[in-house]
Image (spheres, grey):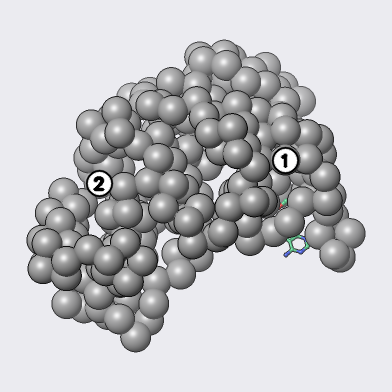
Amino acid sequence: MLKIKNLTYTYPEGATALKDVTMELPKEHILAILGRSGSGKTTLLKCIGKFLKPQSGDIILNDESIFGIPREKLRRSIGIVFQELYLFPHLTILENMILAPVRVLKKDKEIVSKEAEDILAKLGIKDLCDRYPSQISGGQAQRAAIARALIMKPQYVLLDEPTSALDLNTTEEFGKWLLELKAKTTFVIVTHDVLFTQNIANFGFLFSKGKVQAQGTMEHIVETLKRKKHTGNDLPLRSNKH
Ligand SMILES: Nc1ncnc2c1ncn2[C@@H]1O[C@H](COP(=O)(O)OP(=O)(O)OP(=O)(O)O)[C@@H](O)[C@H]1O
Ligand SMILES: [Mg+2]
């Protein structure tokens, strides 16, 4: 279980991006975090990844504060794919994938390479494994970054806007794959894509101005969004029909 307790984060420039946020992210689920642009979603992921240190509050992973866990060890339990992806530009896609398992987990290079190819094949980009990040499209790079997080087999994988550069077919395939994997890995999906999470998430959180405005089933979240639509405080809701 990952617990966020009374988390507050203010950027040095002054914006308070998280205001006393408390939430529980149980395992073996697909969880969605929705919210308008600027509502604090990425800031939350950066705090969970220890890239930002909150001014107050705590983040507890399996009864242990993450602030006492070395970052390299935390990476084995929590994988994060940010909007900017951060693939190493001087390494091929395959090299990007096997770097941490070989260096950090001390796994056999050949075995890990085979695992990497299997994951890349599932995401439809196996034929790109010898290319460099600059030689593939944005959507392909996004899948490569997701594949790189998954190969560590972390308990949690947090994905910031994972479908923003994927076409509809790839998004559907990706959704099915997350459903297959959720027994072993909990996915926390930060997104504007309400329809995508509506179909696959077990539970959702709605962020507004640095606070959790609503939480519950996706049905409840969508209902809340529809109500807010009248106040102009909505996310774009798409029709369920493609
Ligand atoms: N590096 C930064 N320095 C100062 N303020 C920042 C910084 N990054 C984000 N903010 C501010 O913090 C607030 C929350 O930003 P955050 O990136 O967490 O939003 P978000 O919900 O991820 O938005 P989006 O959906 O556009 O990605 C915003 O008001 C934003 O302007
Ligand atoms: Mg963001």
Location of residue 33 in the rendering, given as x and y in whole percent from the top left corner: 56, 35
In the picture, measured across the screen, residue 200 lies left or right of residue 173, that is right
Q: Is mark 1 on a helix, strand or loop?
A: strand
Counting from the top left corner in percent of width and height, residue 91 is at 30, 81
176 or 227, nearer to the observer: 176
Q: Image point 66% across, 51% down: which residue?
A: 67
Is residue 24 depicted above or below 50 in this figure?
above
Left/right placement of residue 207 relative to residue 12 reads left
Q: Distance between the residues labelled 1 and 2?
A: 36 Å
Mark number displayed over residue 98: none
> Between 134 and 53, which is closer to the camera in this rendering?
53
State whether residue 57 is above or below residue 93: above
Residue highlighted by disc 2:
170
Which tag, 1 or 2, sits closer to the chain's start? 1
Residue 151 in view in this figure: yes
Q: Where is residue 205 in the image (x, y as percent from the top left)?
A: 60, 27
Secondary structure found at label 2: helix
- Label pair 1/2, CB-CB below 8 angstroms: no
Going by the numbered disc 2, the residue's amino acid type is Thr
Q: Which quarter of the figure has residue 8?
A: top right
Q: Which of the 4 image quarters holds residue 114?
A: bottom left
Q: Going 43% across and 41% down the picture, which residue do you hit? A: 156
Q: In this view, does 26 lie above or below 92?
A: above
Name which residue lies at 62% across and 20% down.
215
Q: What residue type is labelled 1?
A: Asp
Q: Where is residue 4 in the image (x, y as percent from the top left)?
A: 66, 35
> Residue under circle 1?
58
Q: In this view, does 89 lie to the left or right of 222?
A: left
